[in-house]
Image (spheres, rainbow, N blue to C red):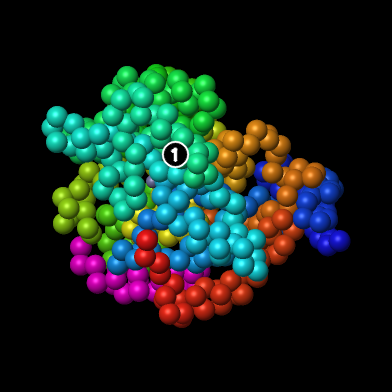
Amino acid sequence: MTTHELRRVAIPALDPGLLYDVDVEDGVFTRIEPVGERTGASGEAVELWPGYVEAHAHLALPANFDDSLDDPRISALSYLYHGVTHVADLFGYPLLKSRWEAGQAESAVPYPELVHCGYAATATRDAMGLTGHGVEFPSPVFQLGMEEDLADVLHANRRRGGTFLKVMFTDGTEQPEMAARFSRLSPKVLEHTEQVTREQGVPAVLDCNTREEVLEAYRIGFRLFAHPVRDFELTDEDWQQLDGARFVSTLSGLRPMVMEREEFRAEYGRPGFLDTQDPANLDFVAGVEEPYGIQYKCQDTRTAALHAMRLNNLAALRRGRLLVGTDCGNTGAFHGYSLLGELDLLAGDEADDPELRDGLRHAATVDNLRFFRELAGQDSVTHPLSIGAPATYNLFTAGTGSPLSTLPDTTVVHGVAIDRTAIAREIRTIRESASEGKVVL
Ligand SMILES: [Zn+2]
């Protein structure tokens, strides 16, 4: 029997005003007991939070600037290194499922828990010649031409272990004046999809960009959105119309398009990058003369979109409807590393507001885990920090002086402490092997 004891730790996710004693036996919490008031004295307390959950990842998309795909063993270890213990893959995972599982079987450390949707569903080519969003990615997508197609898509994804459905609904518009880039599912097919997934208890996550798309999908009955609205700052009236809807933040995946060289240097200069990511990315961004957005003529629209997204994310947070995810696997958004950066992007220049800090960490842990369990089809609603729950947590030095992206002091998964130095060594070994840590699908 292994036992850990933590004395007088703060657990803001339970009560920000109290200190607790915590015991762990055989990988689960056996005692979480308030033992005093938290006075806020400096150096008083260590903070305990549940493990971070990545709410929007793509393990099979190439995050690296040279379009190379990291070995999933490296991605898994990168998550653990950064204290991320659960990952929701929003399409593509079946492409490397066997490699992930082989790595997991021989891993000395427990892999992050994973939930995935198989492949996404999108629209067919339309009369204008536009294709559905998703066909441009190096991962298959299913096309829903008519209502009857849905049954086959759900069956195929289920057979591959998918437990939810990702539906691409956006036409790619980022700002009001822009022309559509993608075809869209017809309202009839979308209504059928909502009805069938609801009846079968399959959670459906919608990929929408605009206010109008989100309002239409909501009216049909969808409540889970892979991104925030990016063309308008939602009004209070909008939020009243969107009661119960939740949104994944995804600033990290969108931002590399508009970043300057110095912003890249700052973003990838945090501790952990060189231990977990391909250093070739640093050489690559060092050569960036101007943001990609200028070359692709979307610098202004994307910058405005990111601004609206952040405001809508913070509004969602105030209403308890924010999920924290990065869209990692898109270029420049890295597994594990970018989830910590996402917290900084969300906090912006308000990072010394204790309420905001706690709110963001709560969203990235407790709220995200609830989302993860829903996607996995688990109906457990127990708080992640309760007696009998897996002892999976991060410890941080309390205080607002450090960025939210600060690495946890300690990460524990099912009662097992993760040795970050050993993980970095393991990643280095894989990168120095014949494959150089890359896979070709
Ligand atoms: Zn995505």
The reply, left or right, for residue 198 in relation to residue 49 is left
Label 1 residue near ligand 1, CB within 8 Å: no
Pick whichever, 48 or 188, lies toward us.
188
**How many numbered discs?**
1
The image position of residue 320, as x and y in percent, is: 55, 33
The image position of residue 79, as x and y in percent, is: 54, 60
* Residue plotted at (43% across, 23% down): 194
Identify the secondary structure beneath mark 1.
helix
Quarter of the image with the C terminus is bottom left
Pick whichever, 178 or 331, lies toward us.
331
Image position of 45 with respect to 130: above or below:
below
* Residue plotted at (70% across, 39% down): 383
Image position of 163 with respect to 275: above or below:
above
The image position of residue 64, as x and y in percent, is: 35, 64
* Residue plotted at (39% across, 74% down): 279
Residue 17 shows in this picture:
no
Residue 229: name its quadrant. top left
Magenta residues, as a range? 269-290
Which residue carries the number 1 mark? 156
Q: Amino acid at mark 1?
A: Ala
Image position of 217 with respect to 410: above or below:
above
The image position of residue 207, as x and y in percent, is: 37, 36
The reply, left or right, for residue 30 in relation to residue 352 is right
The reply, left or right, for residue 319 in relation to residue 293 is right
* Residue plotted at (34% across, 43% down): 141
Mark 1 surroundings: few (<14), some (14-19) or many (≥20) residues within 10 A: some
Image position of 354 with respect to 271: above or below:
above
Residue 156 shows in this picture:
yes
Quarter of the image with the N terminus is bottom right
Does the magenta segment cover residue 289?
yes
